[in-house]
Image (cartoon, grey):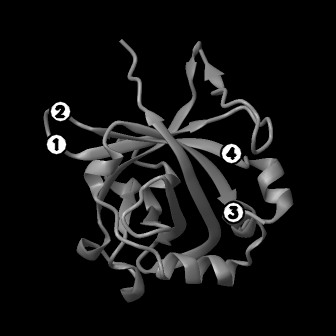
Amino acid sequence: MTDRDALLAASNKELAARLRAGHPIDPAALDDTAWRGISLGLPAFVERLSWKTFRKTFHRDPTTRALRGWNVRMEQHGLDGPDIPRLKNGAPLEFGHYVVESAADHPMPRDLHHALLIHYGLGANPWLDPTRLLRDPLVALEPGRTDRLLGCTYVHFGALIPTPSYFLLEAPIPLVLPG
């Protein structure tokens, strides 16, 4: 069984332990990359209503130097199928914009302060968009390697509320911006 298969089969308790045991990521390693994302930990019926695979992007803003990003909804062709973005008006369907910062600078469980934090509340999301409440700590699965990352989702609603949603990011490729 590969480590990917082990993560796909892992319980949420096992995923939480892997996240806590994860390793810090140099934010510069994420600059201008796009990642294949795989949802972990959700019941199968929730994945059928939403998605199993997605794309997560990271872009270093040349003006502000902030590391920001967004999610891209993908056509669902299985875990090893082609990565084809869903389109809306001829463009990839993007959602959930965020800024990446150190988790140590934000409310976070003590055992996750070594993580990077994907902070949707700082992203360019509409004011009433509920994704603004989401926070995703992100760690590397192996020290010094940034080719496979593990994250989870919290809701920040006065306090941090854990969700059963975990995700694996793998196979980074260069981000190609339009225009």
- Which comes before the other along the chain, label 3 or label 2? 3
Task: Please give the residue where the numbered disc 4 appears in the rendered image.
Answer: 53
Q: How busy is the neighbourhood of tag 4: few (under 14 within 10 Å), some, or many (20 plus)?
A: many
Q: In the figure, residue 26 lies in which quadrant? A: bottom left
For this rendering, which residue is in front, 179 or 32?
A: 32
**118 left or right, relative to 94:** left
Q: How busy is the neighbourhood of tag 1: few (under 14 within 10 Å), some, or many (20 plus)?
A: few
159 to 179, vertically: above or below: below
Q: Residue furthest bottom?
A: 110
**129 left or right, relative to 76:** left
Asked whether the residues under the numbered discs 3 and 2 touch, taking CB atoms below 8 Å apart as contact, a structural biologist would say no
Task: Please give the residue where the numbered disc 2 appears in the rendered image.
Answer: 62
* Residue type of the residue flagged with mark 4: Thr
Asked whether the residues under the numbered discs 1 and 2 touch, taking CB atoms below 8 Å apart as contact, a structural biologist would say yes
Q: CA distance from mark 3 to mark 4?
A: 10 Å
Task: Please give the residue where the numbered disc 3 appears in the rendered image.
Answer: 40
- Which comes before the other along the chain, label 4 or label 2? 4
